[in-house]
Image (spheres, rainbow, N blue to C red):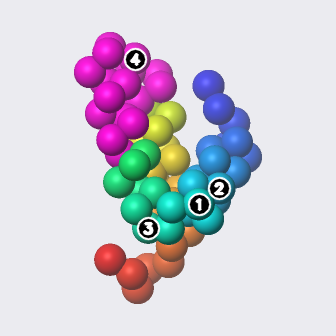
Amino acid sequence: MMSEVQVHTVARQMLEQHGLAAIAKAAEQARACEGRGETDEAREWRHIVDAMKIMRGPHQS
């Protein structure tokens, strides 16, 4: 399981590389993991999605 620091590091790096499309990419990773039965990994990707949503700020959709 990733630490909170690791989650935020991955989230920040993905946002820097992909912009707001990073949220969709991480959500797709979560769905792919779920499809393979990798529930822990899916949970981590969803945590990354949540971190990115916080980082982008409240006024962007």
Mark 2 residue crowding within 10 angstroms, few (<14) / some (14–19) / many (20+): few
- Alpha-carbon span between mark 2 and mark 3: 12 Å
Q: From what the image shows, is residue 2 above or below residue 57? A: above
Please give the name of the residue rendered at 46% of the width and 38% of the height, measured from the top-left corner: 45
- Alpha-carbon span between mark 1 and mark 2: 6 Å
- Alpha-carbon span between mark 1 and mark 4: 25 Å
For badge 3, the amino acid type reads: Leu
Is 30 one of the magenta-colored residues? yes
Quadrant the C terminus occupies: bottom left
Mark 1 residue crowding within 10 angstroms, few (<14) / some (14–19) / many (20+): few
Residues marked 4 and 2 touching at CB (< 8 Å): no
Q: Secondary structure at mark 2?
A: helix
Quadrant the N terminus occupies: top right
- Alpha-carbon span between mark 4 and mark 2: 23 Å
Q: From what the image shows, is residue 22 above or below residue 7? A: below
Residue annotated with mark 2:
13
Residue annotated with mark 1:
17
Residues marked 1 and 4 touching at CB (< 8 Å): no
| Foreground: disc 3 or disc 4 | 3
Residue annotated with mark 4:
38
Q: Which residues are magenta?
A: 27-42
The label number, if any, that marks residue 28 in the structure image: none
For badge 1, the amino acid type reads: Gln
Residues marked 1 and 2 touching at CB (< 8 Å): yes
Q: Position of residue 17 (x, y in %)?
A: 59, 60
Mark 4 residue crowding within 10 angstroms, few (<14) / some (14–19) / many (20+): few
Residue annotated with mark 3:
20
Q: Secondary structure at mark 3?
A: loop
For badge 2, the amino acid type reads: Gln
- Alpha-carbon span between mark 1 and mark 3: 9 Å
- Alpha-carbon span between mark 3 and mark 4: 25 Å
| Foreground: disc 1 or disc 2 | 1
